[in-house]
Amino acid sequence: MTPAQRPLTYHAFVALATADPAVVGLVLKGSHAHDDMATGHSDHDLYVVIADDATTDLTRFGGHRTPELDLVIVSLTEFRAAGMPGFERYALARAEIVLDRLDGGIARILAAKARLDADEAFRNSAEWLDAYANSLYRSVKNDRDGHPLAARLDAADSVRFLLELLFALDRRPRPYNRYLEWELARHPLPGWDTGMLLDTVDRISGTGDVPLQRRLFARVEPAARRAGHDAVLDAWGEDLDLMRPR
């Protein structure tokens, strides 16, 4: 195989992009940006950030994807907007900067993605709290009415919404499931014991344990009220009694 036929490697592309003055940033996301998370199956997911007024031959690599290298080539304006909101937000919040030609500008953009502003956090946490309460209520009601499969499925749904809620309360994007334990080991949620929380969501997801769901809600409710979400909870009226410990 000639050099021209060989697949483009991560390190070869980084050298190529670094030599191009149109490139103002290189940002590595995914497992290679998380210590000890990469495996033999992991590719390198790289954002290539091009100055808004620049042209470059590197655009020919747009959409490049191999088992070794996945490239996303964007303008600086597009990079600022990536994941705001969106699925990419957590990936970029924990991304690694490979190149920053903006005197820390790339780092500041990533830092903004890693931290929800106060209004956004309040709005999002209110929505996730209501979704969590809805799935919890359905799970407990289905268990009471003799529908165990429905109860377990609703319990699993509630865990998803709960995690979104807890991270929003801390003004952080929720990590992907793959990185949940990694994230909490390095950046615990304030007021929560990481081991206890992970064990609890694991058991609820697998079994739909109703008493455990209620005990968890007894921890969540006061935290949500301290964050100013009385209206969301109080809208559930007497149905809150079904969610609370007996």
Image (spheres, rainbow, N blue to C red):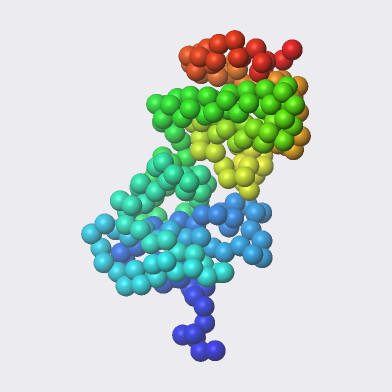
Q: Residue at x 67, y 22 (%)?
A: 141
Q: Is residue 181 left or right of residue 28?
A: right
Q: Residue furthest bottom?
A: 2
Q: Residue at x 63, y 26 (%)?
A: 138
- The location of residue 194, given as percent across then percent down, is 69, 33
* Location of the N terminus (image quadrant): bottom right
Q: Residue furthest front?
A: 146
Q: Residue at x 54, y 63 (%)?
A: 44
- The location of residue 14, given as percent across then percent down, is 46, 67
Is residue 45 shown to the viewer in this render?
A: yes
Q: Residue furthest left?
A: 53
Q: Is residue 168 left or right of residue 117?
A: right
- The location of residue 183, given as percent across then percent down, is 61, 41
* Most foreground residue, 133 or 192: 133
Q: Is residue 181 left or right of residue 29?
A: right
Q: Residue at x 38, y 62 (%)?
A: 73
State whether residue 16 is above or below residue 127. below
Which quarter of the figure has residue 240? top right
Is residue 104 shown to the viewer in this render?
A: no
State whether residue 90 is above or below residue 191. below
Which quarter of the figure has residue 226? top right
* Most foreground residue, 73 or 213: 213
What is the tally of numbered marks visible in this picture?
0
- The location of residue 246, given as percent across then percent down, is 74, 12
Q: Is residue 155 left or right of residue 168?
A: right
